[in-house]
Every structure is written in C-alpha cells, then in structure tokens.
C-alpha cells in the first residue's frame, strides 16, 4: 500500500512544527525520516497514521491492504507502549481482541507473531521481566499480528543499547525481506537509516520541511560489506553535512513551551 | 623520586537500608501488653479505669460465649459492608467519569472538593430525618464517607495512566469501550486499591460513630453502653475487636493487591 502526504503543515499553538510536507511512500519501500530534534518527525509520523490531525494538508492511502490485514497503518513505539498488566501473549493479542476472529485463528496469529520474534518461550512473561530489546520484540510482534499494510516505526530502537539495536535491526530486516511491508521509519540515527532505508527524507529544523530525499543506492545485503563501505561513508557524510548546522542551531534554541514535546 | 604513599579510600556508603526485623516488631507489641499487665499487678493502674489485659481477655471470652459479641459484630459488619459497597460502586463510577470526561471533571471536582472535607458524621442527623433511625441512615453515612475518597483515588488513577498507552490503543483501532476497559481501568487499579485501604478504615470509623449516635446493636453502641456502665473491661474488649476488624479489612485489601497487581 502507498501512503501519500500532501501539503501537511502543523503547529502546536503558535509554534509551527511542520510546513508544507509532501511525501509519497512507495509500496514495499522503507522510507526513513531523519532530522534534528524538534524537526517534527515524530509529529509527522503521528499525522501519517491518523493519531494527530494536521492543521493543513492531508494524508491518504492508495492500494489495497494485504489479505487478513486488520489495521492497515500500524505503529511500533519508541517507549514500546506495552501494558504492564498483560503477559507477552496478552499484549500481542490486545491488537486482535476487539476483532471478530475465530478462536483458532486468533491463537494461530498470536503464536505465529511470537514465534517470528523469537518470543515463543516468553509468552507468559510480564513486560517488567523482559529486557528492553525483548520488550521491543513484543512491540514488533504486536504490530505483525494485525498484518499491517504500512508499518510506522517511531524511533523503535532509540531506547535500546547499541548492541541490542544492531541485533534487532538485523532481525527486523530478515522479517521485512519476506513480506516487504511498506514502512516509514523515524530515527535520529544516521547509521540506522542507512542500514534500513530505501530512501531517506531529511527534515530541516523547526518548522520541519523536507530538505532532501536521498535514495540509498546500495542494495541492502551489501550495506555491511567492506567493498561498499566507501559509498555508505559518502552518503553518511552527505547526510551529516545536511544535518550538522541544523542540529547545532536546534540545540541552541530554547526548549519548546509546555505543549511542544517531540 | 619515590611514589607518594597509597591511602585507602574510606568507605562512605552504607546505612539508610530497610531491613525486616520481625522479632523487634513482635516484641514491641508483646512488650506493650506485658508492661500494661505489670502496671496492673503492681497496683500502678486502677483496674476500674484501666483493667489488665487478662481482664479484657476474660471479658472478650465472656462476650464471645454469650453470643453478644457475634450479635454486635455482625450488625456492624453488615453496615460496613453495605455502606462500603454502595459508596465504592458509586465512587468508582463517578471517579472514572471524572477521570475520563473533561465535562464530568469540570462539574465534579469542585463538588468533590467542597463536600469531601465535611465530616460525614455531621450529616447523620439529616440522613436520620431522610431515611429514619434504622439501618439506611447508617449505611448512607458510611457510603457518603467512602464515596469521596474513592472518587479522588479513581480519578487520580485514570490521570496516572500514561497517555502513550491510550494512543497505542487508538493506533490499533480499539473502540472507546475497549480502551476504557482494557487500558484505563487496569491502569487506574493500583490507585483505586490504595484508595480502598483508606476507605475501609473510614468505614470502620464511621460505623462506630453512627452506632454511638443512634443504635442499640453494633460495636459502637456496645462500647458506648459499656462506658456508661463503667464496664471498662468490656469497653476495651470492644475496642480490641474493632482493631481486629480494621486489621482484617486492611488484610483483605492487601490480598486483593497481591492477586490483582501481580504484574507489578
């Protein structure tokens, strides 16, 4: 499924955070959104999934969701957003509980999602018993269980340590290779964007505008290969050059007034 | 040049740690009872005004055997249970509404703030005029006393549910009732149960006060009567039973917390 953002602007009170955003997320691609803090990338992701109402512009989808899709636009959250009183399996099935599904299919979907994230042995565990990486695996399993048409990943790895981040990136890519689900991925980590994305959209600092959309012209399988390290470094340098001054200026700004936030 | 002498880094941590000291807790309790008994033996305490623990125990045994204890205890427990259940039911409904709906909050919170500080026993005479001298006026007093703290605890619990969890529910297309039932209510439960701890104590206090004003059964009426007759041993026996009632109620709340908040 395709996701189209047309002329989206947004403001928190008198503070403009996004201005005239046009983006087309192509079917089956991973689009990374990067930008300095306060560039409104998470706000944009919230608008894309219908959790925030933009004050101007519109977001639309084109194409049919895959068979068995229960929630076309599905988020994975930075803070995992797990219910602490539900077990791992309970958290995953939360996404299904309000749908009319045969009990067998419900069980099967949950078991399948848990198995794909390597959580089969942890089905009965509670979130507090899990490490950060395992918690986010639950978050991803909960997203997979509804067979999403577009995945909206809101800094999914930012709360994790570097090694866990690398592990989860590889696992996520392995799963993504099979389904090729369209995905939008917000991050402030250039390396993560260069590992995952087909294209990288760079937002300016507040109010966020699209500064550049950069295709990552190295096939995903070759991105860790030594032979392509040069090209990846070039792309990294280019992105960093785009971001550096913006990030410095953003850093010197006063924190947003109370209603701001990310 | 010789290296300067190595000096050990002095230890500065330690202390400020909580450690269970069961024996100390138990001996404090027994110590108090023993000191009290000793005071009576030595003649320091006049048994008419402060009967020895043994006399209180004997009075308690006598009351239990005659059936008077069961009669008064059951009367009080019935009022507590009825008033607490009504007050809690209404309080939870109002508290959830106040926590969830901005309009209910705007209308409800000033009312709660204005009515909560009124000592509920002060409105018992009004309730007696409304409902008569019988059970309903006492139950209503207890319900009123339980209602307001429950509203505050439930509304506070709803406020404490992270916004991000509600957004997550919305992002998966959960209908509003499912967000309330599966996210908001369980999230508010710890605060609600903490409120129960307070409201069971309030219910016990109010039942005694209400029974002292207008009843001939119940532990409050019994304690008052024993005082009027200078039967301090029976009076204290009633007080001991009241303490046990409060302890059991708190124990039930602890049990509920253990069962319902296992995930913490």
Image (tube, grey):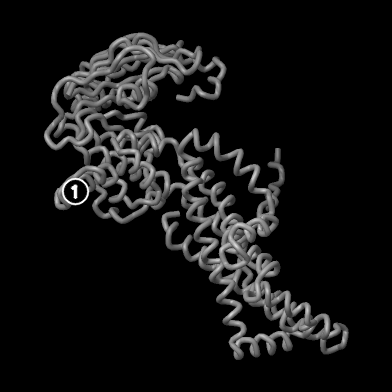
Quarter occupied by residue A19: top left
The one of B108 and A76 positioned closer to us in this rendering: B108
Quarter occupied by residue A139: top left
- Is B164 located above or below residue B183 in the figure? above
Asked if residue B245 lies left or right of residue A53, the reply is right
Q: Where is residue B165 in the image (x, y as percent from the top left)?
A: 40, 39
Q: In the orientation shown, which residue stands out farthest toward the left?
A: A67
The one of A51 and B9 positioned closer to us in this rendering: A51
Q: Residue at left 46%, top 15%?
A: A247
Q: Mark 1 points at which residue?
A: A106
- Is B176 located above or below residue B195 in the figure? above
SS at mark 1 in the image: helix
Q: Position of residue A41 (x, y in %)?
A: 38, 20
Residue density around tag 1, few if under 14, some if 14–19, many if 20 or more, within 10 Å = some
- Is A10 located above or below residue A46 in the figure? above
Asked if residue A45 lies left or right of residue A39, the reply is left
Q: Where is residue A238 in the image (x, y as percent from the top left)?
A: 34, 12
Asked if residue A23 lies left or right of residue B196, the reply is left
């Amino acid at each position: 499924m395709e996701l189209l953002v047309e002329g989206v602007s947004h403001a928190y009170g008198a503070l403009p955070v996004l201005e005239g955003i046009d983006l087309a997320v192509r079917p089956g691609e991973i689009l990374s959104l990067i930008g300095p803090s306060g560039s409104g990338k998470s706000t944009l992701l919230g608008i894309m999934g219908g959790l925030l109402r933009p004050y101007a512009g519109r977001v639309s989808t084109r194409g049919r969701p895959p068979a068995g899709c229960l929630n076309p636009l599905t988020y994975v959250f930075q803070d995992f957003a797990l219910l602490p009183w539900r077990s791992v399996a309970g958290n995953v099935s939360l996404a299904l509980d309000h749908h009319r599904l045969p009990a067998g299919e419900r069980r099967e979907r949950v078991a399948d999602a848990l198995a794909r994230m390597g959580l089969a042995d942890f089905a009965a565990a509670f979130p507090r018993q899990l490490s950060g990486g395992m918690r986010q695996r639950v978050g991803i399993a909960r997203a997979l269980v509804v067979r999403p048409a577009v995945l909206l990943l809101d800094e999914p790895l930012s709360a994790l340590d570097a090694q866990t981040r690398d592990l989860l990136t590889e696992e996520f890519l392995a799963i993504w290779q099979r389904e090729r689900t369209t995905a939008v991925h917000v991050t402030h980590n250039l390396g993560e964007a260069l590992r995952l994305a087909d294209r990288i959209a760079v937002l300016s600092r507040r109010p966020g505008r699209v500064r550049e959309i950069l295709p990552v012209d190295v096939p995903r399988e070759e991105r860790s290969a030594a032979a392509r390290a040069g090209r990846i470094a070039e792309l990294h340098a280019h992105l960093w050059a785009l971001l550096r001054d913006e990030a410095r200026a953003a850093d010197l700004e006063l924190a947003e007034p109370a209603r701001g936030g990310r | 040049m010789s290296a300067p002498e190595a000096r050990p880094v002095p230890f500065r941590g330690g202390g400020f740690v909580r450690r269970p000291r069961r024996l100390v807790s138990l001996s404090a309790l027994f110590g108090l009872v023993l000191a009290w008994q000793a005071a009576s033996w030595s003649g320091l305490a006049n048994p008419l005004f402060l009967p020895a623990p043994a006399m209180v125990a004997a009075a308690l045994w006598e009351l239990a055997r005659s059936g008077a204890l069961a009669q008064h205890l059951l009367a009080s427990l019935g009022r507590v249970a009825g008033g607490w259940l009504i007050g809690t039911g209404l309080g939870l409904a109002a508290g959830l509404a106040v926590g969830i709906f901005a309009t209910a909050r705007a209308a409800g919170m000033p009312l709660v703030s204005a009515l909560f500080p009124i000592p509920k026993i002060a409105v018992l005479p009004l309730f007696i005029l409304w409902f008569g001298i019988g059970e309903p006026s006492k139950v209503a007093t207890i319900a009123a006393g339980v209602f307001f703290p429950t509203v505050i605890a439930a509304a506070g619990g709803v406020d404490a549910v992270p916004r991000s969890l509600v957004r997550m529910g919305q992002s998966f297309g959960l209908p509003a009732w499912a967000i309330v039932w599966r996210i908001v209510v369980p999230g508010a439960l710890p605060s609600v149960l903490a409120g129960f701890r307070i409201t069971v104590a309030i219910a016990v206090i109010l039942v005694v006060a209400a029974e002292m004003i207008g009843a001939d059964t119940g532990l409050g009426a019994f304690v008052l009567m024993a005082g009027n007759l200078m039967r301090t041993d029976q009076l204290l026996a009633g007080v001991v039973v009241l303490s046990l009632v409060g302890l059991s109620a708190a124990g039930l709340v602890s049990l509920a917390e253990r069962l319902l908040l296992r995930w913490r």
